[in-house]
Amino acid sequence: MSATAGFTRPPTAQEAVLAQVRRELVAGALRPGEQVRQEQLAERYGVSRVPLREALKILEGEGQVVYHPHRGYFVAELSVDDLIEVYRLRELLEAEAIRAAVPKLTQGSLVALRAAQAAVVRANRSREVAAITDANRRFHFELFELSGRPRLVRLLGQLWDSTDVYRTVYFGQPVNRRRVDVEHERQLRALELRDTEAVVRLQAEHRDHSVATVRAVIESGLLVTSGPVRARSSPRDPRSG
C-alpha cells in the first residue's frame, strides 16, 4: 500500500479562510452592504491579513464582495439584475448538464441521488441555513457531475458560489423549504423514468420559484426572512466550486 494512501491534504490558510467567509455570508453574519473589517476577521480566524485578502479577491471575482478604493471591501448588495443574469446563465448550462447526465444514469446513481435528497430533508428539518444550502447543492451536483463534463460543472459551481446569499434568503422561509422537498421528489421521479426533458422542465420551475421569491424580497427592501434560521460551521463540500 502506498505510504500516501488515505492522506488528505489539509487546506491552506487561504482555503480555510475562504471557506469560513463563505459560511459567514451564507449564515448572514456578514450582511449585504456591510463593510468587511479585515482586522477583526483576521484576529477572529487567527490568521494574518494576507490569506484573508486573497480570499476576498476570490469573492470579489465572484461578485460576492466589492472593493472601494480607500474604503475597503463590502459585502455586495442583493441585486435583481444580478439575480436574473446569473439564473439565466444557470438555465442554459444546467439544461446542457442534465441532457448529458440523464442518459448516463445507473441504479447506483439513482441511489446516490435519493441519499442526497434524504440529506436535504434532514437539513430542512434542522432549519440550519448552511446545512440546507450545502445539502441542496450536493443534490443538484450529484446529477450535474454525471454529465461527464468537468468544465461545465466547474462553471456551474462558480455561478452557484456567486448566488449563495440569494439561496439563503429563499431557504429562510419554511414554505420554500417544504417546496424544495416536493420539487426534488418530482425531479427524482422523472429521473427514474429517464425523462430528460421533464427533468429540464422541473429544474427550470425549481429555479423560477427561487427567482420570484428572492426578487420579491429584494424589491420589498427586506434582507432577512421570517422564522429563525440558524447557522452552522461545518466544512463546505469539496464539489462546491
Image (cartoon, grey):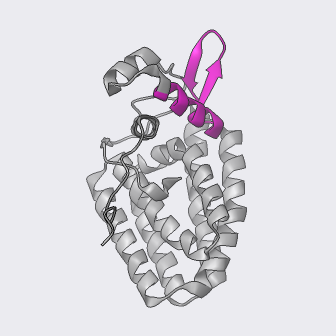
Quick check: 99 above or below 165?
Answer: below
Count of all numbered marks drawn on residues in the image: 0
| Side of 150 relative to 171 (left or right) | right
**Where does residue 168 sit, x and y in percent of width and height?**
46, 45
Give x and y (percent) for residue 77.
59, 30
Q: Work out whether residue 64 can be spotted.
A: no
Q: Residue at x 72, y 63 (%)?
A: 92
Question: Residue 134 at what x, y percent from top left?
Answer: 41, 55
Left-right relation of 229 to 222: left
**Image quarter for residue 154?**
bottom right
Quadrant containing the N terminus is bottom left
Residue lying at 46% horizontally and 35% vertically, measured from the top left = 14
Q: Could one spot residue 191 in this view of the protein?
A: yes
Whether residue 142 sits left or right of residue 125 in the image: it is right
Rendered residue at 62%/26% (across/down): 66
Vertical order, 134 against 61 (above or below): below
Task: Please tell me which residue lies in front, 229 or 174.
Answer: 229
**Residues rendered magenta in the picture:** 51-76
Position of 153 relative to 227 (above/below) = below
Q: Tell me the quarter of the picture where residue 216 sits.
A: top right
Verify whether residue 176 appears in magenta: no
Q: Is residue 97 above or below residue 45?
A: below
* Image location of residue 158, percent across then percent down: 61, 50
Comparing 203 with 49, the one in front is 49
Identify which residue is drawn at 65% across, 56% down. Answer: 155
Indicate yes or no whether the magenta region holds residue 73: yes
Q: Residue furthest top?
A: 70
